């Protein structure tokens, strides 16, 4: 009888052990610093997270993409609650993503929610000395002189009412040219070359050229593709340029449009279930007199939208948080009246996004740029599902 009791006890213990199953998961760590979407102050930031239980060890991954397919760091068996990124691992002006998991004995946790941060960009010292700026103009490629109104913003504000004109002994720095009015009769400004913003060099002459085209005509055509094949149907878009145009279908032909620079803005529609991934050859094109210009709206079928857009700000190269009035324009329209940074926007559709600064920012500071660009596509060419816009201010 005693033998049977022992056998029964062993069987009960075996059943009890199998009922217990696998060990329960540990809770996932919670990331603490640097703040999600912030700009760190050095290329060796300290990453910190909260403890989940005493005696646990941690694993940290840091990558250049939100899918963690391009790992920069994969460090295991961390006993503490922080990790200092070693030198020479990170590059300037790059967004990185990081996450942490925990383990203790035979128990593990899932990965924490991933966070991102932007590395700083070294600010060059302010330039010194003076230089010379010349403004000239062309019409249909030939030099032209006459009345034209423009301004130059930079270390010193300049303005002119005719070309050719030279400004002497101006402070060295970056100048941005804005065209106001005037120029050759019946012509349209096509471009400012070599570019509207240029940095002068002490003792040298920097030239801005206003390039006008005679009011010639030609056709603008808007086409569409689906997975690389030609597609026709309902799609709404606008063309902004010397003449404002709009369409509700493709293929569409706008005959005898004025020459100049046109930008195509996609609004809605297209193949059912597909996503706009690009506008080629470029969303902005310059139409020269007598020529035809074609825009292609390129759609891809079956794309899943799970993208993240992050908006941040910096002041003199350091991360800044506060109130900024801005708008984001994308495939679903405009996100109006956004007022604070950092800000993260999740589950955004695939396509092209632009960010527009309206007002606000650090007191007394000036917005110098939006990096890496005020226009970006998501997914990116590398397949990343997250993009970031950073408003960069200078005191």
Image: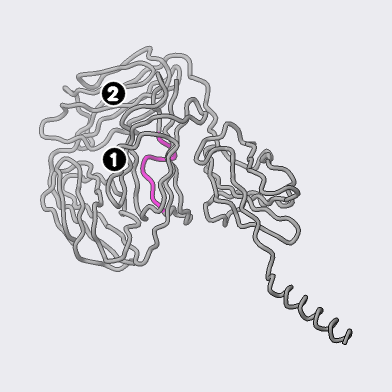
Q: Is residue 103 toward the left or the right of residue 190 in the image?
A: right
Q: Is residue 71 above or below residue 142?
A: below
Q: Quadrant of residue 2?
A: bottom right
- The dot on residue 135 is 2
- The dot on residue 25 is none
Quadrant in the picture for the N terminus = bottom right
Q: Is residue 377 magenta?
A: yes
The residue sitting at 37% across, 14% down in the picture is: 170
Q: Which residue is mark 1?
A: 336
The residue sitting at 28% across, 23% down in the picture is: 135
The residues bearing labels 2 and 1 have C-alpha atoms spaced at a distance of 38 Å
What residue range appears in magenta?
370-378
Q: Give SS at disc 1.
A: strand
Q: Residues within 10 Å of mark 1 (few under 14, many from 20)?
A: few
Quadrant in the picture for the C terminus = top left
Image x and y of residue 32, in percent: 59, 40
Give the mark toward the camera: 2 or 1.
1
Instruction: Answer whether labels 2 and 1 touch (C-beta < 8 Å).
Output: no
Of the pair 167 and 104, the residue shown nearer to us: 104
Image x and y of residue 356, in percent: 32, 37
Of the pair 366 and 144, the residue shown nearer to us: 366
Image x and y of residue 19, in percent: 68, 73
Q: Residues within 10 Å of mark 2 (few under 14, many from 20)?
A: some
- By secondary structure, the bulk of the magenta-drawn segment is best described as strand
Image x and y of residue 315, in percent: 47, 26
Q: Residue furthest front?
A: 1
Earlier in the chain: of badge 2 and badge 1, it is 2
Q: Quadrant of residue 339?
A: top left
């Amino acid at each position: 009888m005693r033998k049977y009791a022992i056998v029964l006890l062993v069987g009960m213990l075996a059943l009890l052990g199998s009922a217990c199953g696998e060990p329960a998961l540990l809770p996932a760590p919670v990331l603490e610093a640097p703040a999600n979407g912030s700009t760190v102050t050095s290329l060796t930031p300290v990453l910190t997270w909260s403890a989940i239980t005493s005696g646990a060890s941690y694993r940290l991954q840091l990558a250049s993409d939100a899918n963690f397919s391009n790992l920069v760091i994969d460090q295991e068996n961390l006993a503490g609650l922080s990790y200092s990124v070693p030198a020479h691992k990170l590059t300037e002006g790059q967004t990185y993503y990081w996450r942490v998991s925990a383990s203790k004995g035979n128990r593990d946790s899932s990965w924490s929610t991933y966070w991102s941060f932007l590395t700083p960009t070294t600010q060059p010292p302010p330039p010194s000395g003076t230089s010379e700026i010349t403004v000239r103009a062309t019409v249909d490629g030939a030099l032209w002189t006459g009345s034209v109104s423009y301004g130059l913003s930079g270390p010193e504000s300049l303005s002119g009412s005719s070309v050719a004109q030279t400004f002497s002994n101006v402070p060295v720095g970056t100048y941005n040219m804005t065209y106001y009015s005037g120029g050759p009769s019946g012509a349209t400004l096509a471009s400012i070359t070599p570019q509207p913003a240029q940095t002068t060099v002490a003792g040298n002459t920097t030239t801005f050229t206003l390039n006008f085209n005679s009011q010639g005509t030609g056709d603008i055509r808007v086409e569409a593709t689906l997975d690389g094949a030609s597609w026709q149907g309902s799609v709404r878009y606008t063309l902004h340029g010397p003449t404002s145009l709009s369409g509700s279908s493709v293929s569409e032909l706008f005959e005898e449009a004025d020459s100049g620079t046109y930008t195509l803005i996609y609004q809605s529609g297209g193949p059912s279930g597909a996503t706009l991934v690009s506008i080629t050859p470029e969303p902005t094109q310059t139409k020269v007199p007598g020529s035809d210009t074609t825009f292609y709206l390129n759609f891809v079928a079956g794309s899943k939208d799970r993208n993240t857009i992050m908006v941040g700000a910096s002041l003199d190269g350091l991360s800044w948080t506060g109130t900024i009035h801005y708008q984001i324009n994308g495939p679903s329209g405009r996100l109006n009246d956004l007022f604070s940074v950092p800000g993260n926007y999740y589950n955004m559709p695939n396509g092209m996004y632009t960010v527009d600064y309206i007002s606000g920012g650090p007191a007394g500071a000036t917005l110098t740029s939006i990096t890496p660009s005020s226009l970006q596509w998501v997914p990116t060419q590398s397949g990343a599902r997250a993009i970031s816009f950073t408003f960069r201010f200078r005191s």
